[in-house]
Amino acid sequence: AMCSLGYLSLPETLRPRSALPNEQHGGSSSSSSATAAAGGWRGTARHHVSTWLIDIKPLLKSGNQQALIAMSAVPSLRWSCFSSVVTLHAAATLGAGPKEIGLMFTALALSQGLAMPIGSYLADRTNGAKLSLVLPAGFLSCLAFASLGLATSLDQFLFAMAVQGFCAGFTLPAQGAFRAEVTPAALRGQAMSLERQAGSMISLLGPVTMGVLADCAGSQSSIFLTSALMAGCHVLYMMRARPTGSL
């Protein structure tokens, strides 16, 4: 909520209230501001909270925004499992040390950097929800993540990490382009805050939850569950993202 309120100060969210879509006004924005100012800091706070609620409601009801929020959870799920389970699994499986683990993440970052220009180019030339980019790359990434639970050599770990980075080079630009197309400029700050909040909550709770699961059921179970959750986010995107209309 603090993150979302902070986005009220962005230029996109400081546009006149009449510029926002699907919004009912009981009076002019100037009269609302004057009433808030007359009430002191409490009135100003109530005014900002009421403004925030007006912005949030259409976003939470929007299928496209729900799809984007679901996809924003994927990187957080992946990194939560990376930080708490995958590195320990690599250490236990092949005795990986700092050098090997560093190589794994280098493979991830390098392949993503190489794929990003291609993914960005294709995203600009693909209409609508970019399903033809997001879904194949996304599900392949989920499969590669699951394969980490079965990897027994450094080459297999490096290959699985490289595939995930390469796929992210296609999914991330497509999501960003779709977000820009369907989100009104006056609501982009709030829309981004909702996505960040979803990812932050997973980053907060995910590592400890996955760590406990790994202790109770083994690291493979935690990796497979994370892969299934990531795949579920892609299924939700497929079901909720629509190519036409705003929000």
Image (tube, rainbow, N blue to C red):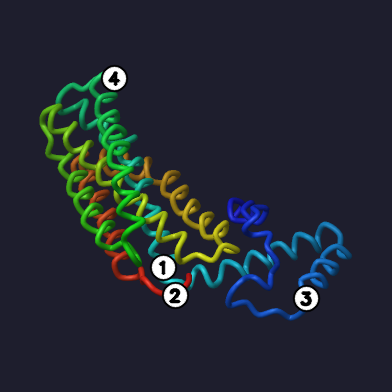
Q: Quadrant of residue 186?
A: bottom right
Amino acid type shown at disc 1: Asn
Disc marking residue 245 = 2
Looking at the image, residue 12 lies above or below residue 77? below
What separation in Å lies between label 3 and label 2 (alpha carbons)? 27 Å
Q: For the residues carrying marks 2 and 1, which lies nearer the camera in this image?
A: 2
Crowding around mark 3 (Cα neighbors within 10 Å: few <14, some 14 to 19, many 20+) is few
Disc marking residue 98 = 4
* Mark 3 lies on residue: 28
Residue in view at x 23 percent, y 52 percent: 137
Amino acid type shown at disc 3: Ser
Q: Which of the two discs, 3 and 2, labels the residue nearer the N terminus?
A: 3
Could you tell me if the residues under marks 2 and 1 are in contact, i.e. CB atoms within 8 Å?
yes
What separation in Å lies between label 2 and label 4 (alpha carbons)? 49 Å
Element type at marker 3? Answer: loop
* Mark 1 lies on residue: 64
Where residue 35 appears, as percent x and y from the top left, is: 84, 69
What separation in Å lies between label 4 and label 1 (alpha carbons)? 41 Å
What separation in Å lies between label 1 and label 3 (alpha carbons)? 30 Å
